[in-house]
Amino acid sequence: MNPPSQSLGVPGEAVAGLRVRWHGRMEFTGALALQEEIVAKKREDRSSADELLLLEHEPVYTIGRTPDRSSLLDVAHLPHPLFSINRGGQATYHGPGQLSGGQDLHRYLRWIEQLLIELLAGYGIAASRRESLTGVWAGNCKIASIGVGVRHWITMHGFALNVCGDLSPFNHIVPCGINKVAMTSIEKETGNKFSVVEIGEALERLALDRIIDLRVAPEAQLINV
């Protein structure tokens, strides 16, 4: 059973207009329904706090809005369920040992990348962006994927940071449609064991400190991400 939703380190009301909630390990359908609920609430009341949901998924593959499904390889024999969802991009895998986070914030792709780069630097990992490839890289390996959907100018989905655990499910797809990409994790890069909760706590602290970077004037908010 999943623990009740809660803030990892800052309980109670939103801080700086951002509420962070930890949902433990949950099925993808439950997480998607929760995001839909938040989007509906935000659409009804734009003054409601932005939310960052942190969780681990049960094993699942997702693919974005594209007729090109070549990144799935042998789709009939994928070892875990597949969902087509309203984000951009090709196929990726979500599962235990991976920290997933999604927000109902505007224009935040680059903000997420920078947030993850700063987070990883705190663990001695020199992460970076790659031109024209959304996500975060550690050397020649990809350590975090980012996929965003926008509905009524409110974003859904977000990032998936590989913390620990089995990376072999990525072998059944072309991750994010990038041929011959190798996936890595914090555990693999550092040789140390970390829990998703531990990394989530560090990310929450950093996100609450950096949320000011996303605050823009109302007239500048309707920018397509």
Image: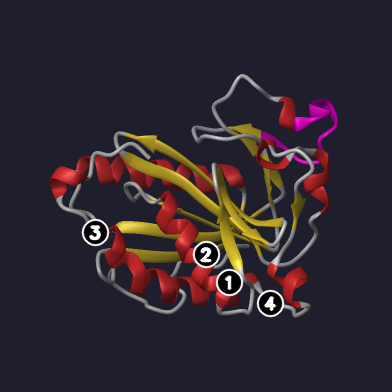
Of the residues under marks 3 and 4, which one precedes in the sequence?
A: 4
Residue in the foreground of this view, choosing between 29 and 131: 131
* Closer to the eye: label 1 or 4: 1
| Residues marked 2 and 1 touching at CB (< 8 Å) | yes
Mark 4 closeness class: few <14, some 14–19, many ≥20 residues within 10 Å? some
Mark 3 closeness class: few <14, some 14–19, many ≥20 residues within 10 Å? some
Q: Amino acid at mark 1?
A: Leu
| Residues marked 4 and 2 touching at CB (< 8 Å) | no
**Residues under labels 3 and 2: Cα distance?**
18 Å
Image quadrant of residue 77?
A: top right
Mark 3, secondary structure of its residue? loop
Q: Looking at this rendering, what residue extends furthest in the front direction?
A: 131
Q: Position of residue 41 (x, y in %)?
A: 28, 45
Query: Can you identify the residue that label 2 sits on?
Result: 116
In this rendering, would 188 be left or right of 200? Answer: right
Query: Can you identify the residue that label 1 sits on?
Result: 120
- Residue at the spot 83% in from the left edge and 44% down from the top edge: 171
Q: Position of residue 127 (x, y in %)?
A: 60, 65
Q: Position of residue 50 (x, y in %)?
A: 31, 56
- Residue at the spot 19% in from the left edge and 45% down from the top edge: 220
Say which mark, if any, is on residue 215: 3
In this rendering, would 48 be left or right of 209? Answer: left
In this rendering, would 7 be left or right of 119? Answer: left
